[in-house]
Image: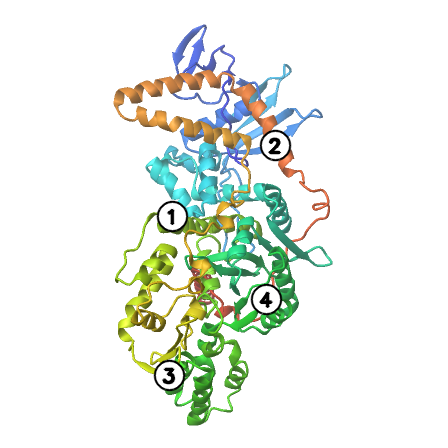
Amino acid sequence: MDDGTCGVQESSDMSISSDDDSIKERNENNVEVEHHHGEAQPHALLGEPELGMTFDNENDVREYYTKYAKAKGFGVMRRSSNTDANGQLKYLTLSCTRNGKTQSKSRNMLKPNPSAGLGCKAKINIARGPHGKLYLSTVILDHNHPLSPQKSQLFRCNKRLDFHVKRKLELNDRAGIRVNKNFNSFVVAADGHDNLTFGEKDSRNYLEKIRRLKLGSGDAEAVRDYFIKMQSDNRNFFSVMDVDDESRLRNVFWADARSRAVYDSFHDVITFDTTYLMNKYDMPFACFVGVNHHGQSVLLGCALLSNEDTATFVWLFQAWLTCMSNRPPKVVVTDQAKAIQNAVEIVFSDSRYRWCLWHIMKKIPEKLGGYEEYDHIKVDVGKEVYDSLTITEFEVAWLRMLEKYDIGDNEWLKGLYEHRHRWVPAFVKDAFWAGMSTTQRSESMNAFFDGYVNAKTTLKHFVSQYENALRDKVEKENIADFNSFNSTIPSITRFDIEKQFQAIYTNSKFKEFQEELTDIMYCERKLIQKEGAIETYCVPCIFHEEEFEIKCSCRHFEFRGILCRHVLCVLTQKKIKEVPPKYILERWKKNVKRKHNFIRCTYGGMDDSPVAKRFDSLCNSFYPTAEIGAMSDDSFNSLTEDLRTLQIKYTSNSSSEKNKDKAGTQEDQLQEDAPSNGAATSKSLLSPIAVRCAGRPPSLRKESKVDRLIRQAKEKKKKAELRE
């Protein structure tokens, strides 16, 4: 029976007697029988309560009256009770759930809440007799309202969550399945709501309770304890928590062991973004994202922040740098926020830094939309930014555009031109960025978490759901590794160069190479100048044959790490069969043994109780037997009979086993509640205060589907209230 209900737990030794010497009890097949002077007869239904009926304990009487009420069609509640100095029950009243007053507790008199009270007098009073037995001292059977046995399962006292139901709810919740879908799986399995002993609200309440039990009472303390446990599982798990003078959580950063190992292989390029609000404290989720050998986004650490000022970002970047063995990235991509820019210049002073091009270009309508020739201005800005191959070409075209439309006094354009080295492709494409010109990697990682968290997610629930989301990301990389190992993309040409990259690169990167290779048909192979060993082609490429040095003005290889169509055009023209190693990047190779592939992530950090582990083990052992038993009616009937025999065998010792398990569970809970590090948990840690984040307005922040639905529902409700 679920805690908090007025129902009664099953008891195998229940006995009910009355003054006429008839005793009702259960036989070995769990069928109720009534003994009359030694003669046992099957009893289909429980008899009505009678004065003087005796019971051994409170549990027996509550179980009896609840079953009686369910058969009649009304609910039962504990109305009053009294105990003596030793804690023994002296007096107890169980009544119909409709015994109260028909009075709403709502503060708004115009919107009263429904009330079940009808003043029903039906009840039983139980008192303790001189020999210690409980007996019925008062019995009132008449109700002042209709009864409905068909609706009995909806009364709170008849609702219960069996152990296997609780276990499945927990496992599905860990897998990120929403509560409504989690509950619907039970509805389908039971062939309808009527066959269930619980509702969706019961499932939701139980999961909320379990989340509190697993991670503690307070959000901040729960997150801290969770990090301590994760670090005990893997010493390479890294976490830092920033608190204020009142011991209130401000910022938190963490990275698992696998993320730290991934950085060893892919530390050249990272993006950083804070545009995703996802928990009830409105703390931005900030993530460091890199690119792996398949071109997939990989998480290199993440944080929850209480502010978006320079000091906060400096703290975060320093924590991340410490986590990554003080090895800064070669290049960093962020949005245009001034606070982030200041922090990058302080902490990552030796790194190449650029702004997200997408964030800049999307502001064009807002900043330039007021001009009459906006449509033409928008097109020309795009041409200057994307089509300029050299710095000189961009600067000439940009100044010409300002003069053409007389927009040289626009402050936004002035600021962009002043910092053009931070965002214009012609200024930054001489460095390797793994093809990233925007923080889209970070935002796609944010979107990846959409199915697991939303605006109501608490901190303690977030860390567990974070693991579920990241586990899926790791599995996608494992699948891509297997596909590159187990399959080969066929060549589409007869060039030896293609076979060279086919054998070395991962499938996804080889596809990119093939795309450039097929596009050489659009390039002219005309030699326009030759000075000694240096040849200049119109594509335009410069090729030094003796040193095998080739450069293209499009800088595709420098920017993406993949040879461009212009270079491949020249190499095929020269009948080159193999390119030197400097044009084959180690990070795109498929047969390289990388450290993070041998590290198991600390997923599933929340240990199960011993009871849950034994339950899972028994279920897994039974599945093969169940499959055999389901093959025919004979095997099904035989297995069912054997199971009934086993059930009777183990039920006979249920009382002692329950007491033993209860003691063990309490001991396990005490061990789980005990802090793993006394120094770390000696001081209470307070949850953060909900804050309003600086930087980009909330309306422009990335909004998940769940958040949007919640917002729309609130707006609809508010409009309806205004109409009323």
Kindly indicate whether the residue at mark 1 contacts the one at mark 4 (C-beta within 8 angstroms): no
**Would residue 457 be found to the left or right of residue 246 on screen?**
left
Q: Amino acid at mark 1?
A: Phe
Q: Which residue is mark 2?
A: 668
Residue 544 in view, yes or no? yes
Residue at 60% x, 27% y: name it.
664
The picture places residue 74, in percent across and down from the top left corner, at 44, 34
- Determine crowd level at label 3: few under 14, some 14-19, many 20+ residues with C-alpha closer than 10 A: few
Residue 142 in view, yes or no? no
Q: Which residue is mark 1?
A: 482
- 2 or 3: tag closer to the N-terminus: 3
In space, the residues marked 2 and 3 are separated at their CA atoms by: 67 Å
Q: Which residue is mark 4?
A: 692
Q: Which residue is mark 3?
A: 379
In space, the residues marked 2 and 1 are separated at their CA atoms by: 41 Å
Q: Is residue 192 above or below residue 238?
A: above
Label 1 secondary element? helix
Q: Quadrant of the C terminus?
A: bottom left
